[in-house]
């Protein structure tokens, strides 16, 4: 990271003066880079793509910054955007600056306050639901996000789009193929046969689960929803479906499936749905379908890393771990469709 170039760009934006100091890379993400630093006694967090850019890395950064700017005046918990740079020549990639968040990610470990209170842990799930309900209630046209995605036929496109994604993994040598994924065709068939007839377009986060939120250190409230790279205009109920697809099942779930401990006290999936229902005018009669779609979509996304690992383009251990998650997601979808 060229900190001198960053400082020169910040000069042009009127963001302090002098050197960039106390720079430290933040952990938590697996792809994009987060750098916290200070300048002229103000703290910043910089977000940019990884050193080895993918085809859409820069556009993803520009999209994220656009969304954060659009929801700046809303009550959706999010990192406050300070400034964005779409010019890839400044640091070798598009990037943006945001305010630091005073919060923690539950999957990285619960502080004593949260670990010691079932009431506070219960509140975390409810606060997450409130966050996506607020996001889905925003008028995307009014906040300037028309054109961010293609809401026309959004639900009709889903199965074929992800079926094609799965088929594309055949280009990776030695990939074990879809035959190892239980029910991949049965789930696709069920989704097509049970698709909701209509929906109301809105902003969706696109990857909403426990790893992508920060919780306030003094309560179970959300400090921010983070990692906005998959945001688009679609059906906001998919965010709730995604949360259900990744939420531990049952009151006493298998410890291997729980990324947060202790889990006791967290809301059940049924409580999450009812809490969302009380905060929306959307029809939740088909929420089961959105959960199955989330299992299908996320499972196929994760299988991509397994396919790359089979071809020696990703760590084998990571590929095996994500392949196991893909299998678990499809097994969950099969249970849900009966």
Image (tube, rainbow, N blue to C red):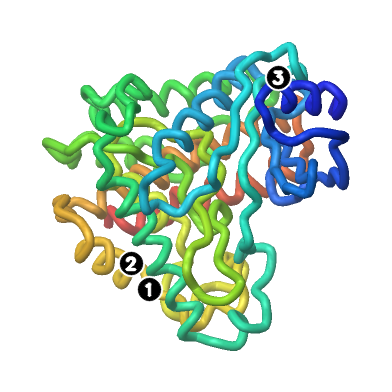
Q: Which mark is residue 146?
A: none
Are the residues tagged 2 and 1 within 8 Å (C-beta)? yes
Residue visible at 50% across and 73% down? 220
Residue visible at 38% across and 73% down? 268
Q: Would residue 144 be found to the left or right of residue 306 on screen?
A: left
- State which quarter of the image contains the C terminus: bottom left
Check disc 3 and report the residue beneath it: 93
| Mark 2 Cα shell of 10 Å, populated few (<14), some (14-19), many (≥20) | many
* Measured Cα–Cα span from mark 2 to mark 1: 6 Å
Q: Nearer the viewer, residue 247 or 16?
A: 16
Viewer can see residue 193: yes
Check disc 2 and report the residue beneath it: 272
- State which quarter of the image contains the N terminus: top right
Name the element at disc 1.
loop
Closer to the chain start, of discs 3 and 1, is 3
- State the image quarter where residue 217 is shown: bottom right
| Mark 1 Cα shell of 10 Å, populated few (<14), some (14-19), many (≥20) | some
For marks 2 and 1, give the one nearer the viewer: 2
* Measured Cα–Cα span from mark 3 to mark 2: 39 Å
Viewer can see residue 189: no
Check disc 1 and report the residue beneath it: 268
Disc tally is 3
For marks 3 and 2, give the one nearer the viewer: 3
Residue visible at 54% across and 45% down? 80
Residue 12 at x, y percent in the picture? 70, 21
* Measured Cα–Cα span from mark 3 to mark 1: 41 Å
Q: Would residue 2 be found to the left or right of residue 205 on screen?
A: right
Name the element at disc 2.
helix
| Mark 3 Cα shell of 10 Å, populated few (<14), some (14-19), many (≥20) | some
Does residue 281 lie above or below 221 as drawn?
A: above
Does residue 180 lie above or below 88 as drawn?
A: below
Closer to the chain start, of discs 3 and 2, is 3
């Amino acid at each position: 990271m060229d900190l001198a170039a960053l400082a020169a760009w910040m000069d042009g934006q009127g963001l302090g003066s002098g050197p960039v100091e106390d720079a430290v890379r933040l952990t938590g993400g697996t792809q994009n880079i987060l750098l916290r630093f200070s300048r002229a006694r103000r703290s910043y967090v910089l977000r940019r793509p990884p050193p080895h850019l993918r085809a859409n890395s820069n556009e993803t950064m520009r999209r994220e910054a656009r969304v954060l700017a659009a929801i700046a005046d809303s009550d959706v918990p999010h990192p406050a955007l300070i400034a964005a740079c779409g010019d890839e020549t400044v640091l070798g990639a598009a990037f943006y600056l945001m305010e630091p968040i005073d919060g923690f990610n539950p999957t990285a470990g619960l502080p004593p306050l949260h670990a010691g209170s079932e009431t506070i842990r219960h509140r975390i799930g409810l606060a997450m639901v409130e966050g996506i309900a607020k996001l889905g209630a925003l008028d995307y046209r009014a906040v300037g996000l028309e054109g961010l995605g293609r809401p026309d036929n959004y639900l009709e496109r889903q199965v074929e789009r992800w079926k094609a994604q799965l088929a594309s993994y055949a280009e990776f040598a030695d990939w074990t193929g879809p035959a190892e994924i239980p029910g991949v065709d049965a789930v696709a068939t069920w989704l097509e046969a049970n698709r909701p007839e209509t929906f109301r377009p809105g902003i969706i986060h696109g990857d909403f689960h426990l790893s992508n939120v920060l919780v306030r250190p003094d309560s179970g409230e959300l400090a921010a929803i983070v990692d906005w790279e998959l945001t688009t205009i679609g059906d906001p109920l998919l965010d709730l479906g995604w949360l259900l697809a990744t939420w531990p099942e049952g009151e006493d779930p298998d410890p291997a499936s729980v990324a947060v401990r202790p889990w006791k006290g967290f809301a059940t999936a049924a409580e999450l749905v009812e809490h969302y229902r009380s905060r929306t005018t959307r029809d939740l009669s088909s929420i089961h379908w959105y959960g199955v779609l989330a299992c299908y979509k996320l499972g196929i996304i994760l299988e991509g890393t397994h396919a790359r690992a089979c071809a020696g383009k990703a760590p084998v251990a990571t590929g095996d771990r994500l392949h196991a998650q893909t299998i678990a997601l499809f097994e969950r979808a099969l249970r849900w469709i009966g």
